[in-house]
Image: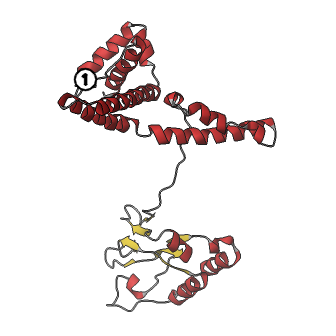
Amino acid sequence: MLWDALVLLHDSTAVAHSPWAIVGDFNQIMRTSNHSGFPHIIIDESGVNDMIAAMQEAEVFEAQSKGSPFTWWNNQEDNPISKKIDHSLINQAWGNSFPDSYAEYLEPDQSDHAPCLFRTPSHRSQIRKPFKFYHHVIDHPDYCETVRTAWQPDMIEGSNQYKLVRSMKCLKKELRRLNRTHFSGITRRVREQSAKVDILQRALLTSPDRPTAIEEHQEGEKLNKLRIAELKFYRQRSRVRWADVGNRNTNFYHKTVDQRMKKISLLGQHWVSKLTQQTTFREFWGIQICLLLLRM
């Protein structure tokens, strides 16, 4: 019997203390209002008491629901009848863990039963992204010390293979933290830092003074570093080393740039001040090329 199995599930397994839900066709109404003929005809209530008793003993109750009030119909033209014989039952642990969860009964389509979609709006499964080493992290002044501190295989007991695996896990955690703290949302950081430098430069052109000039140099240096990091990020993300191809001055590179230029419009231009070395200029020139290639 279904009801005996429901009670047994609650009494003799670890499920009783965990959030759980039972969704499906019980082939049984729970109350007279679950029948489309109510209150105009006499409803057969056989089995209702057994179901309620089993639910009470198993400590489960109906989940919130939306959609059609009935979940099944007899598919008859002369005497159509609809009932709610599909139910969604949950225990208290489920209600505490997912307080906004609910069952949504949809249109049956080709079936005589309405499909049930159980939703938990506030619960989003956390999919852990695989670790990816970003090249721009190497340029941060804390990179070497972070690696030196995290990589301590001699402090780990076990085989060499175990030491290697544990050391890599510790290092990945710290490199994630370093990237998240200083480079997450790199394009937004570049935009915000560029706006800050623009304000300082306008101030210097309006009423120049020594403190503003010093601050402009400092913030400009931060902006340059962020732009280099942005270039490396997009270059790595695109999986195509456009800057290296460009340095070799190939026809493929210039034809690609020409095709991209026909499809895009340049909406803004970033200016970089006080560039003295050719290699530094090439880094920033690459940013513009990289961004143009990505904006198709």
Which corner quadrant of the image does residue 12 belong to?
A: bottom right
Residue 79 is left or right of residue 64, and the answer is left
**x, y percentage for residue 224?**
38, 26
Q: What residue sits 57% from the left and 70% below the top?
A: 19
| Disc 1 target residue | 263
Residue at the image point whose x is 37% and y is 71% from the top: 66
Quick one: which residue is furthest to the front in this view?
210
Percent position of residue 178, x then y? 53, 39
In the rendered view, tell whether residue 290 sits above or below residue 41.
above
In the picture, which quadrant includes the N terminus? bottom right
Q: Is residue 20 left or right of residue 224?
A: right
Mark 1 secondary-structure assignment: helix
Give left or right: position of 18 versus 203.
right
Name which residue lies at 36% across and 76% down.
69
Count of numbered labels shown in the rendering: 1
Residue 49 visible within the image:
yes
Instruction: Specify whether residue 25 is in view.
Output: no
Q: Residue furthest left?
A: 206
- Location of the C terminus by quadrant is top left
Q: Amino acid at mark 1?
A: Lys
Would you call the spot at circle 1 few (<14 residues within 10 Å), some (14-19), or many (20 or more)? few
127 lies above or below 72: above
Q: Nearer the viewer, residue 239 or 276?
A: 276
Can you give x and y, in whole percent of width and height, for residue 231 in the image?
Answer: 41, 26
Q: From the top left corner, tell me how far across and down residue 172 is, in percent.
A: 61, 39
In this rendered view, identify the residue nearer to me: 200 or 119: 200
